[in-house]
Amino acid sequence: MCLTLTAGISLGVQIHQSPSAVIRNTGDNVQLVCTHGQSDYRVMLWYQQSPGDKALKLIGYGYTQFKNDRFKSGFQAVRSKEKQSSLTITNVQTKDEAVYLCAASLHTYFGKGTKLTVLEKDKEITEPTVEVLRPSPTECRNEQRNKTLVCVATGFYPDHVSISWQISGVGVTKGVATDEAAQWMPGKTFYQITSRLKVSEEDWYNPKNQFNCTVNFYNGNDTVPYTDSIRGEGIVFIVKSCIYGAFVVFLVWKLQVCSTQCSM
């Protein structure tokens, strides 16, 4: 089935879905709510999008009243009002982790979705550690004159995170490249995600500039920001660094020459 996703608001149609994220323990029940503003949209539908899967799976649908035999096992829906529907997921398991989307009318208008995470046994919610890394020393010789800052968020569970960058308090999106999803670190029982910010040489060599990376982490109750920052480097420091680098290269070459001569 080919579906056209129009999330949130389109052509005056408003689909509101809440909450936007949910974290639950195994065996809990979860309730999601969807409302819209069109009285002539009598059919409402619920879909499931599993992690890493772009396809939407239809959970069930209903008209004025839902018939739960139209829903998959473990899911119950109620049409409490003409423009409102609630979906209950009973006895949630890790297999139920997904983004759940509500739709109204002919599958066209969707809510923004609810991300459900089911905590694994013996795992606790853990906040991220955030660090901004300076550009690589090799970029001192970068002919394109761009510098790349890297923001690393690690040690967190579950993976409800988003990343944003600011330069001296002003949000930036140009030059930002963030991993599509947090990566599970095998054997370490936590997630990690990185984001890269490419800035001009002029911006980086301005010591007045402060580069902030903010990682917003949802802990099941609130979305909490975790931030790290670094300042741009002064040109004097850069020149010294380059001179020092050249000195190290010269010293290594000198030792190699000495070693060759001494062995003759």
Image (spheres, rainbow, N blue to C red):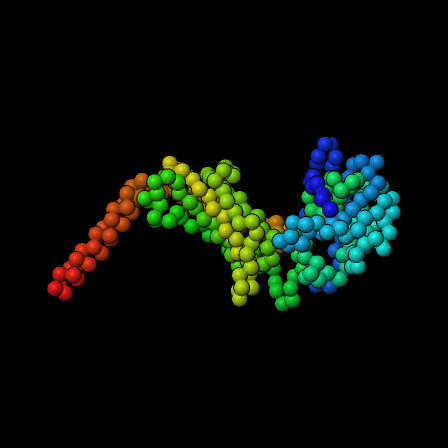
Side (left or right) of 249 relative to 113: left
Q: Is residue 12 above or below residue 247?
A: above
Q: Which residue sits at x=25%, y=46%? A: 243
Q: Is residue 225 above or below residue 154?
A: above
Q: Which residue sits at x=67%, y=54%? A: 50
Total labels drawn: 0
Report which quarter residue 73 is drawn in: bottom right
Evaluate whether residue 10 shows in this view. Answer: yes
Report which quarter residue 125 is drawn in: bottom right
| Outermost residue to the top | 11
Side (left or right) of 218 relative to 188: right
Is 129 in front, or is 60?
Answer: 60
Q: Which residue sits at x=86%, y=52%? A: 67
Q: Position of residue 63 (x, y in %)?
A: 85, 44
Q: Is residue 141 above or below residue 249?
A: above
Evaluate whether residue 214 shows in this view. Answer: no
Is 191 in front, or is 62?
Answer: 62
Q: Position of residue 152 (x, y in %)?
A: 48, 52
Give the quadrant of the C terminus: bottom left
Is 234 in front, or is 72?
Answer: 72
| Outermost residue to the front | 1
Q: Position of residue 215 (x, y in %)?
A: 54, 49
Q: Which residue sits at x=68%, y=61%? A: 94
Q: Position of residue 16 (x, y in %)?
A: 73, 41
